[in-house]
Image (tube, rainbow, N blue to C red):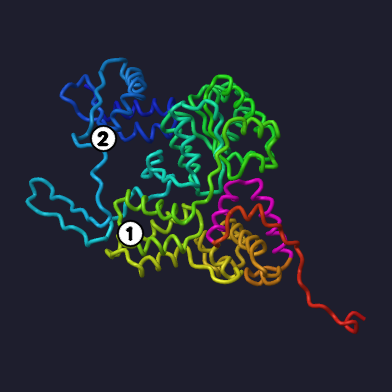
Amino acid sequence: MYHPPKVWDGVLTRLRTSMSPIALEAWITPLTAEMNEDPQELRLLAPGTFHEARVRGRYLHVIREALEQETGGAIGLRLCTESPVTETPPRQEANETTETPASPGTGATTQRPAPNTPAFQPGLSHPSGSGYSHSFDSFVVGPENVLAREASIALAERRQPGIIPLFLAGPSGVGKSHLARALAAETGGLYVSAEAFTNAFTSSLRRKDTEAFKHRFRDCRLLVIEDVQFLEGKNATQMELLHTLEQLAIAGRPVVLTGDRLPREMSGLQARLVSEMTRGLVAEIEPPERDLRRRILKTKASRGGVRVPEECLDLLVDSVQGNVRDLEGVLIQLVASASLLSRRIDLPLTTAALRKIAPAQTGPLRVDTVVERVASFFGLSRQELAGRSRRKTVLAPRQIAVYLSHRFTNATLTDIGRAVGRDLPSVKNAIQVVERAILEQAPLRYQVETLVERLGIPAAALDEQKRAPLQVVRPTRSKRQRA
């Protein structure tokens, strides 16, 4: 006799080798295997009717093939919904609260939490977490991003072949990844970062097995590559991507690329690759204005079952001038604090959350502020950052603090060195090390961009602002002193 959960685990293992991770996570892993009256049938439960219809229409044949391989065709397959209710519950008004029904048969009622005291919702986790839904329906639209969203939907539905490839351009945190992942999930396409593409290519060269690499990236239903700015200066990988895009174009398969700026602004990309990337449609996503940021924040809270008072929403939106991810970070802090402390979400609690995550910046940026913010970001104290330790976990944050202080404050190198307990040669070396590293190491650049935005500065300033010369301000001497 077959045991459904064990059979399903084997099927999932097989599907992981044939499906994109995003499609697998979005549509397959939510299915659960259940004991059935018929031991020769595997019964899969979908969480809702919409989910069942999507799996039945797009993925049921793939599941059936994997099941036949797992069991030798000895058992059948049945797909149904978990319950007769519809997947989307009735919409509640913003000022309504919900009550959890009592468990059947217990005779006890479940106490309703205090009004406006939310439980911490997994749906408010980081976008990369499993609780976050990357779909077109959950993407909040405004004038800043409407073209990118409509182009993505048209591409998913194969309505506009002339927009291939689609390039989504915009700074960090404006929704490029949301649309890219939604496209991959809708179409069952292949989703990778430019860094992963590079690693796969170099690994295939090392193994002398480029055919497997080409099969993976040129035979997919849809290819999504994020953060192509990572490829700047990597000529061999750029040529391989160029050939991949050309082959996919010949096969008529859609391609989606994302970058933190327009392709023509990426000086480290070859002209042929830029030309191929811009052969279709380039949709630029602008940073969201206040109205869109407010609607995004309200929508995310609402979908997590949380009601945030209007005055608190206004305070959040006006105080956090960074990208949407910064807004999400403050919202998570606020909701978690309200849940753990069993408190209402109100202005004092919102102010406290803002102070922990995004303190207001008044006046010119100071070295002390930079050092404190960097130390907090890496889980260090200011004393540790300015201490004598040369451990990598302390040295790298210290160098970043020096670099950011040099770039975005008016302090002299002497003042910066004093703030972190270092001499002038060490300060100069730190600046040069970080300047090189952010061009060569994408993860470090992302950390620096995040810190820049937390300092209330647009991440684009890393590229736009001219570097100040590495000069030390020394007091002038009189003629008598020089003599």
Residue at the image point whose x is 74% and y is 64% from the top: 425
**Disc 2 target residue:** 48
Taking 387 as reference, is 181 left or right?
A: left
In the image, 259 versus 407, the foreground residue is: 259
Q: What element carries label 1?
A: loop
Q: Main secondary structure of the magenta part?
A: helix
x, y percent for residue 198: 60, 35
Residue at the image point whose x is 67% and y is 70% from the top: 411
Q: Residue furthest top?
A: 73
Say above or below: 295 vs 418.
above
Assign the N terminus to one quadrant of the image: top left
Disc 2 marks which amino acid? Answer: Gly
Residue at the image point whose x is 41% and y is 51% from the top: 296
Q: Which residue lies furthest to the right in this view?
A: 483
Q: Can residue 19 be seen in this view?
A: yes
Say above or below: 29 vs 457.
above
Q: Is residue 196 visible?
A: no
x, y percent for residue 324: 47, 52
The answer for how far apart the CA atoms under marks 2 and 1 are is 28 Å
Displayed quadrant of residue 85: top left
Going from the N terminus, do you reach mark 2 or mark 1 first?
2
Residue at the image point whose x is 18% and y is 26% from the top: 36
x, y percent for residue 414: 71, 71
Q: Is mark 2 on a helix, strand or loop?
A: loop
Q: Which portion, as a residue range, is magenta?
A: 425-454
Displayed quadrant of residue 182: top left
Assign the C terminus to one quadrant of the image: bottom right
Numbered label attached to residue 308: 1
Say above or below: 295 vs 62.
below
Disc 1 marks which amino acid? Answer: Val
Taking 189 as reference, is 86 left or right?
A: left
Q: Which residue lies furthest to the bottom in this view?
A: 480
